[in-house]
Structure formats: structure tokens, C-alpha cells
Amino acid sequence: MVGTQSTGTRQLTIVGAGPRGISLLERIGAVWAADPSRPALTVHLVDDSELGAGRIWRTDQTPLLCMNTLAGAVTLFPEEGSSVQSPVRAGPTLYEWGILSTTYPASWDARAFPREHVELFAKYPPTAETIAPWRAELAQLRPDSHPSRALFGQYLRWVYRVARDTLPARVTVIEHSDRAVGFRPGQDQDEVVLRSGAVLRVDATVAALGWLDSFPHQQDASGLEAAHTHALHWVAPANPIDQDLSELPAGETVIVRGLGMGFFDAITLLTLGRGGAYQEDPERPHRLRYTPSGREPHILATSWRGYPYFPKSVYGGLQPPGALPRTRRAFKRLDRERQLPGSIDLDSEFWPEVVRDAAEAAIRELIRHDPGAANAPLDEIVQVIDHTEGTLGALHAALAETVPGIADALPLKIMDPLRMHLNRRSGEPGHPTEPTPVAQLTGVLAQAIDEDLREADKGADSIRRVALWEFSAARRLAHLLARGGRLTATSHQGSYRSLIRFGGMIGSGPPARRTRELLALIEAGVVSFLGGQPTVTAGPDGYQVQTAQIDAPVCSRYLVEAWMHQPDPSASTDPFVRDLVGTGSATVFQHGDGTPGHAFTVDIPTGRAIRSDGTANARLWLAGIPLEDFLGDTMISPIPGSDPTMLIETDRIVRSLAEG
């Protein structure tokens, strides 16, 4: 048993050594270095995955899986001018670290990156042995590259080394390659129980947890029961690198449910991961041709929306920030005036402004491309937008004659792309108006996806994407308004959830290359689509799927859930999490009307857990993804120049730790 030392050294456990755990360690170094009077501290860092990288970014995973974040758009170091209140110690982005790793100092251009980033790297350069396995990928790295997740893990490992090695002498780190499986609150100290049997007696604990494992939901239970009853094969929802796809036979029909990032990961593992190959082919609209290995299954894809996430626009960097003039004004007013739970009706007070901003952005872009696209001066059009109900239908009706192009720049059904494309093409020869065979539906969607890709390739010149980015950019403001349960339960389930999901479809989609690969797989007959809102039943012959878009159900003995459950402490199988709740050390959030939430509750200024008696826990802090439904914006990696939420969170927790 490890306890407080006789010298009075304070004992801290950080449970979770992924990006947040490492950021907490970096912030501890900054705070303790700034005040030599702070007491000695021993940090017990606990994780059974790779320390630094954590489970999601571990470096031993296949290099086929890439980030949907750009190499130049991710960092773990705070920046000057951010909301971080402790001393800032700047460091390189993933891209800068990668280039420095292969060029410094032999062929280094001193003007390329900020001086302080280079100086930190020069003090702690990675070893040649560490970099050797990554040289081929690093040679191709650009600011707008989508690096492999394993390479990001290697960057995180380096950041961990820097954070650990720059700690003041009175801060010691003890690594525990182990799993926390229990939490026992005590009178003066708490106990963190490890799977190995070790018990850490500590003065403070920070749970920097990532995605939580969950008990089977009703949907899971039916899939699992069918697998047992009828000898079917069901792959449960999980992080793709934790799913076993090896038993899906070559040539067999496999149903994949989910069309977000998990879907793109699954098809990558089932094609490139099985020896298939892509060749550049300028004769094809999408410029790629797929050559099967013969080991692929035939994938039938469906999801609730029935349409894959949009490809990322090719900007050569981060997308331009949304203008959102009305939305930002509404945010500032609501954030200032409404602090009580359930006091903000996002449906009526925020969402209409997002729609108006999207309409104005689309019209401004139309006029930029074609000054004759509008039949009235822009300031008059803006007045019409401001005095029209904030719905797409009302704005279309009010602007149809003045700006005829609004119907294509911001279609009425833009938030339901499956329906939008089917309706728009229903009058064209060969396009269905009624349920249709899978092959015909797939052909329609292939044309629509190809159109999405062409819009993505236009980058900042895509009129439709400019409007869509307004929706995507509004997500963070909505997250901030939702903090602490300030939304009404109705608007949380309504426009908030719609905005977050639709914004994710726009802003969290795959790299454009992945969409090119999808089109090549469709052309090769490897992937087909089943439509949206599927009904899945099971019997002796397999899982049967029916949607409103196909004329007959399809059946397969194999079902892959290509999505992940929303983190929910109340449904977690993790014994450590269950102890936090079961002992009353932490509580699960509830909306103002008593509707159960899906997150821990914390004191927002400090990050302290809220106990079952409603008080802030003096020895327990909570961070990260299991707070998403309460805090919002906890899943996004820190983006340079964006004042990232994650680094603000870790900074305020460490400042609270230091004060306590």
C-alpha cells in the first residue's frame, strides 16, 4: 500500500494516461514551477494501455487507420493569448514535431516554426530508434495531412516524456501500468484499488477517463441474443481497433450499421487490411480504382440517417471559421443572462439564428461567385433574413425570387441528405420514387456522394460548404450554452441534438481520400447501401434488414455495429466508475426536468466531482469525455489558435488541485 510519506509529500493519482492525463501532468509542471512554495507532490499515473498514447492512440495499432484531424491542427501545448490562466509553455504541433524529427538540425530552416517550439524540441529530441519506424510516413507529412493514429500516439508519447522530464524536482511521477478497479473514500485520504491488488492511499484523485465501456443496451442485447440463439455473428459497438473483424468471411454478405467514422474504419480494415489496393486512375471521376484481393466480404451499409458523413473539404489547412454574427450575439446574451438549469430554450432562442446565418453565408458566397445572383442589394436581403422566421422553409419562401440560387446553395432538406438526394433526383430517368432494389439505390447514392466529393474538392470556393460550415461552427457555442444543464429538456433533445449530430456529419467526416476510396469500392461492387432508419430483426437465417428505401429485406449472418455508445457513467461496466457513483463520491447529471443525463456532474470552475449530497468533493476531480453531456466539447482534440476546451479544462483542474 502506498500512502502519504512522512515528509508530508502530497499523493495524487491520475487515472488515465491518454492525452488528458498527459496534459494534466504538463499543467502540474507549469503550476508547481511557478510557485516554489508549493508542497512536494507524488503523482501516481495509472493506465493499463500505453502511457501517453492511451487506448485510442496506442502506437502498436495498424497504420491504416488515420486521424480525421489535420497534422497541423492538433497540439497538446497551450498558447499565449488563450484562456489558460497558468503559465504557458509553448511546444510544437504534431506536424512541427514530425518535420523536426526528420530534419533537425541537419537540414533545418530556422524560420519555419516558432522559436520556442524549436527550442523545446531541441532540448528533448526523440531518439533515432523511436523515429525509425515512422520515417516513411513522416516523409509524406504536410500540414493538411491526416496522419495515422499510431503516429499521433507517438507524438503524445513524446509530449509525455517532455511533461515528465520538465517537472520540478519536488514533483515525482510513479508509473503504474495497471488498471484502476476500485475507489474507496476515507476520512482523510481515499484509496484507489488497482487490478494487480495494489492500493494507493492518496490525498487527491483526478479521473481523466476516455470512452467508457458500457453494459449492453437494448439494441445490443437483441443483437447478442440473436447471435447466441441462432449461431449468428455480431460485432458489438466499440472503438474499431478493439473490434474483431477477422471472422467475417471473404465473399460473404456483411451488414454494417453506422455510416460515420466507424464505418470508414471498418471498410478500410476489410479492404486495404485484407490486401486490396487502390490505383490512381484519372479516367474515373473520383480518380481511384480498387483492385480486390478476393478476401473482402460484400458490405451492405445502413444507418439511422442512411447517408455517409460528408468528406472533409480540401482547404490545404483548417476550414475557415464560421462568421455567425447573429448566433454569436445570441450566445453572448444567453450566456450572460441565463445561468439557471433549464433556462435556455435553444429551439427558439438560438437555432433560428444559426439558420439565418447559414442563409446569409450562402447568399454572400453566391454573390461573390456571381454578382448577378441576387435581384436586390445585399443589405436589403440581410434585412429580409433578419425579419423572417428562422427556418429554412420560411427563408426559402421569402428569398426565392430575390435569390433564386438559394434553393441549391442551402436546400430545404440539407439536414436529411438521403431524402434530399432521392427527392431531387426522383424526376430524372432511372431514379426511384418508390422502394427500389439495393443496386439502384446504391447507384443514386454513389452519384450523390460523388457530388459531395466535388464540393469538398472546391475547398473555400464551395458555396454549399460555406453555408454548412455555419452549422458546424455553431456546435461549440451550443455546447457552451448547454453546460450545467442550462437547456430546457425539450430543446436539448430537439435542436441541440440535431445541431450536434448534423454538425458532426459536416465537420467530423472522413478525409476526402476516404470518400474517394468509398466510391471506388462501390464501383468494384464491394459496398452497397440499404437506406436509412433500418429495422433489424433476427432469425435462423440471419439478421434481416428492411428500410423504406429498398423493395425487399436483405439478410446476413453477420452484423457489424460501426458506431460507439455515448459515454454514460450510469451504464458503465468499469468497476472504478461504478465505485465513484456507488460510494456517492460522484453523481450522474440530471436535466432540470429530472430526465437522466449521460455524464458526471462537476463544479464547472474547478472540475471537482459533485457528491451525492450536492457538495463539491474535496479530493476528487473529473475530466474529459465522460462529462460530454454535462460540459460539451470534451471530445475535440486541442486545435492551435482555437483556445481549446480541453486545455482550459486541464488547467483549471490543476489550479484547483494546487489551491486544495
Image: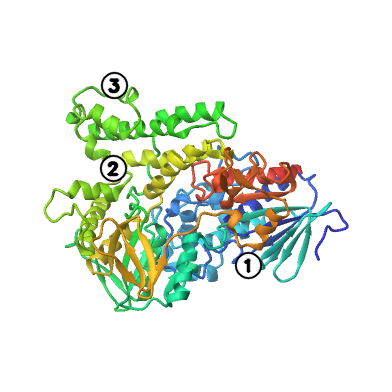
| Amino acid at circle 1 | Asp
Disc marking residue 171: none
The residue at which mark 3 appears reads as 379
Residue placed at 50% from the left, 49% from the top? 636
Cα–Cα gap, marks 1 and 3: 59 Å
Asked if 272 appears above or below 581 in the picture, the reply is below
The residue at which mark 1 appears reads as 48
Screen quadrant of the C terminus: top right
Of tags 2 and 3, the one toward the viewer is 2
Disc 1 element: loop
Disc marking residue 413: 2
The answer to whether the residues at label 2 and label 1 have Cβ atoms under 8 Å apart is: no
| Amino acid at circle 3 | Asp
Furthest-left residue in this view: 429
Asked if 656 appears above or below 567 in the picture, the reply is above
Residue 78 shows up from this direction: no
**Of the pair 545 and 120, the residue shown nearer to us:** 545
Cα–Cα gap, marks 2 and 3: 27 Å
